[in-house]
Image: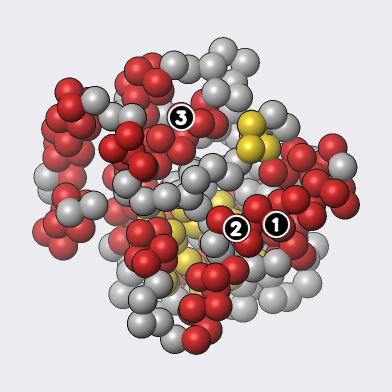
Amino acid sequence: MASFVTPDDMPGIRNMEVREDDVILTTYPKSGIPFSSQDRFEQSSQLLENPAWIRGVGKSYEHVATMPSPRLYKTHLPIKFLPKQIWEKKPKIVYLARNPKDCLVSNYNIFKSDIHPLEWNEAFDFFISDEINYGSIWDHQYGFWKHRNDDNFLYVDFADMKKGGSLSSAITEVTRLSSLKEMKAIYARLEDELGDKGKLLTHAAGILPLLYQGTVGGWKNIFTVAQNETFQKHQEMIIKDFDEEFRKKLNTG
């Protein structure tokens, strides 16, 4: 887990009350959770596993307990660490998956804000190691993928969201509001209205902006040929026992 997650947080999250009308947004870090309005962003800006610093005290999962229904909240936790009541209460769970290579590049930009910033080659090695925060992206995605056909689960691919295409008018509007342009506008308003606290919401450690290009396939601009081969071999090793549809989806990304 990330350094701000303590051993005491996990039972607190696992045992928290879930409501049937909850909407839980889930992703691996830096996969791109969209927000359609400033209110929604600020309401759910804290991960369940984060300290609730925007509210001053406590933990975010404790703050979520005080929110009126319907609640919208988010987490980067693997599915096995989500509140146990999701299987009983069956809230809506939306999982946003992203090409692991693009996710690595986006994480690299965040690694730059660390006290000891990682160079690209170091970030590459760290991402495919056993030490990466929240564990393997492949295990993380597959845990939710296996439930994609459950009535209360929606598994969304970042690349498909970017394409848009022949979607319903409602989804088209969500896609528009989730665009990098719209999200940057929301971030700018947060910084104007909340000052330094707003910048802590929109920048990693208050320094580097959380929003970058938001593109698909940007990894091609930074991966070397050798790194791509290493990454592919590592990916194949991890997903070799996953179902064929998931493996095919990853290998065409």
95 vs 98: above or below: below
Q: Position of residue 157 (x, y in %)?
A: 36, 62
Q: Secondary structure at mark 3?
A: helix
Q: Which residue is mark 2?
A: 181
Please name the residue shown 32% across and 21% down the image. 125
- The answer to which of 42 and 240 lies nearer the viewer is 42
What label sits on residue 185 in the rendered view? 1
Query: Which amino acid type is shown beneath numbered disc 2?
Result: Lys
Q: Position of residue 52 (x, y in %)?
A: 76, 44
Please name the residue shown 20% across and 58% down the image. 249
130 vs 105: above or below: above
Q: Which residue is mark 3?
A: 108
137 vs 148: above or below: above
Query: Which amino acid type is shown beneath numbered disc 3?
Result: Tyr
Horizontal placement of 242 versus 66: left or right?
A: left
Foreground tag (1 vs 3)? 1
Q: Which label's residue is closer to the chain start, 2 or 3?
A: 3
- The answer to which of 29 and 130 lies nearer the viewer is 29
For label 1, the crowd category at 10 Å Cα-Cα, with few meaning under 14, some 14 to 19 and many 20 or more, is few
Q: Position of residue 148 (x, y in %)?
A: 33, 69
Q: Position of residue 9 (x, y in %)?
A: 63, 41
Q: Secondary structure at mark 2?
A: helix
Q: Quadrant of residue 138?
A: top left
In this orientation, does residue 85 appear?
Answer: no
Query: Which amino acid type is shown beneath numbered disc 1?
Result: Ala
